[in-house]
Image (cartoon, rainbow, N blue to C red):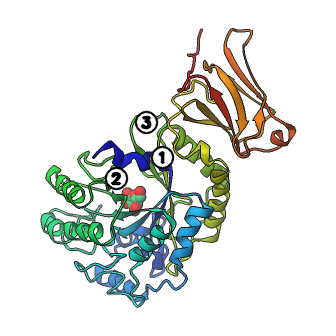
Amino acid sequence: MSTDSAAWFRDAKYGLFVHWGLYSILAGEYNGIVTDRIAEWIENNLDIPVEEYRKLARRFDPKAFDTDAFVRRARDDWGMKYIVLTAKHHEGFAMYDSAVSAFSVTRATPCGRDILMELRRACDRYGVRLGVYYSQAQDWDDPNGYMQYKDNSRKDFQKYFDEKCLPQVCELLTNYAPLSLIWFDTPMSMTMAQSQALRDLVKVLQPDCLLSGRTGNGLGDYMTTGDNALPRLPYDGDWELPATVNDTWGYNRRDDRWKSPERIIATLIKVVSRGGNYLLNVGPTAEGLVPEPCVRTLDAVGRYVKANAEAIFGTRSAGLYPFEVPGIEMTHKPHKLYVHVLESRVRVELLNIGNAVTGAYLVEDRTPLDVRTYRTCEGDAMVEVELPPRLQARAHYCVCLETAEPEPVYEPIRK
Ligand code: GLC
């Protein structure tokens, strides 16, 4: 991969993950049995027979899904820069027009819509980057695909890999180009040769398409964290955190454990301040609607993101500031240290910043703010930004400190 292929990714910071498939119909319940696990795993967790599961396709008809409005909302209301759709999740069902398998949205459902193509066109219209999720090792529909928690010892995985996985990946990269990334997942016991074959195929067809960190055998283009697992420290290199707004990826009717907008904003800023991207998930219903509480949260987060876009997109890790200050997170661009204020306060006071601070302003409207730097009675560097009363009364804004030096300089904590 040339460094340039990842340049967009490094700047993009905030993307939309979309988990949508036949599991969305079950919404966490099958034959009166409820799963408390992630809803897209229901076939596996509740041992639904493959023939029964397949019949769900006859009920997939998302009349309420307006692809154009969906992409527009992700871009304009939520402030996201890229979208990743589950083109095929572990269930094995293709959410696109696949010639390789009839178990697909175009051939097995009453709607016959090519959801991925609709997204491709809408993303082109709105200048949003598109990626696909593809479960390369687990395929619970194919007799030779792996299935976690089950006995895989008698499977001819290579056969599945050659006859379904590689040809489908080829279709995706050929018919839905340009894909900005392909999100491989759960490699399980794939061999190095298999991961390499996958990588080679992607790069031959689309050299600039990035591979997620779960390609297997270390062959991805960037680091993917565990689900909802935020690294405590800045991570050196490109990386992405896949995360949920409630506790499931695929739609679960009963899961109302929605995170607050405040919590999502804080996580986003922590991710960005540690150098990564936040890939936040929605699980539409079978009809194609994003649950209302999720929409409200993403709208609220979007307001912060749009007002403070300068302090999020295109920024780099702010390094390891030596203190944890409640309600404060930092991001960085050359000569700028962005201080995100997530809890209300009287003034911004930051110890141990060694930079020469040349000015400060409120990011949302560029109002200049009074800033002074001095040494405390203990001899430590101090930056103080005075906040007008209108700011003291609220939270969720961002102050930019302009610095003479391009990089943040933090003085170590001394005895
Ligand atoms: C997982 C799960 C899955 C989900 C994904 C998102 O590993 O298997 O269902 O798609 O993580 O990160």
Determine whether, in the image, residue 256 is placed left or right of residue 347.
Answer: left
Q: Say which quarter of the image contains residue 201.
A: bottom left
Q: Are marks 3 and 1 in contact (CB under 8 Å)?
A: no
Front in this rendered view, residue 132 or 159: 132
Q: Nearer the viewer, mark 3 or mark 1?
A: 1
Q: Say which quarter of the image contains residue 336.
A: top right
Does residue 67 appear in the picture of this structure? yes
Quick one: SS at disc 1? helix
Quick one: SS at disc 3? loop
Q: Is 5 situated above or below 331?
A: below
Q: Who's the residue at 29% across and 84% down the image?
A: 51
Q: CA distance from mark 2 to mark 1?
A: 16 Å
Q: Which mark is residue 212?
A: 2
Q: Nearer the viewer, mark 2 or mark 1?
A: 1
Quadrant in which the C terminus appears: top right
Q: Which residue is mark 3?
A: 235
Q: Residues within 10 Å of mark 2 (few under 14, many from 20)?
A: many
Q: CA distance from mark 3 to mark 1?
A: 15 Å
Does residue 260 appear in the picture of this structure? no
Determine whether, in the image, residue 193 is placed left or right of residue 96.
Answer: left
Q: Amino acid at mark 1?
A: Asp
Determine whether, in the image, residue 267 is placed left or right of residue 343.
Answer: left
Q: Amino acid at mark 3?
A: Tyr
Q: Position of residue 212 (x, y in %)?
A: 34, 52
Q: Amino acid at mark 2?
A: Ser
Q: Which mark is residue 11?
A: 1
Quarter containing ligand 1?
bottom left
Q: CA distance from mark 3 to mark 2?
A: 16 Å
Q: Position of residue 225 (x, y in %)?
A: 41, 46
Q: Counting residues from the N terminus, which is met first, the one under dot 3 or under dot 1?
A: 1
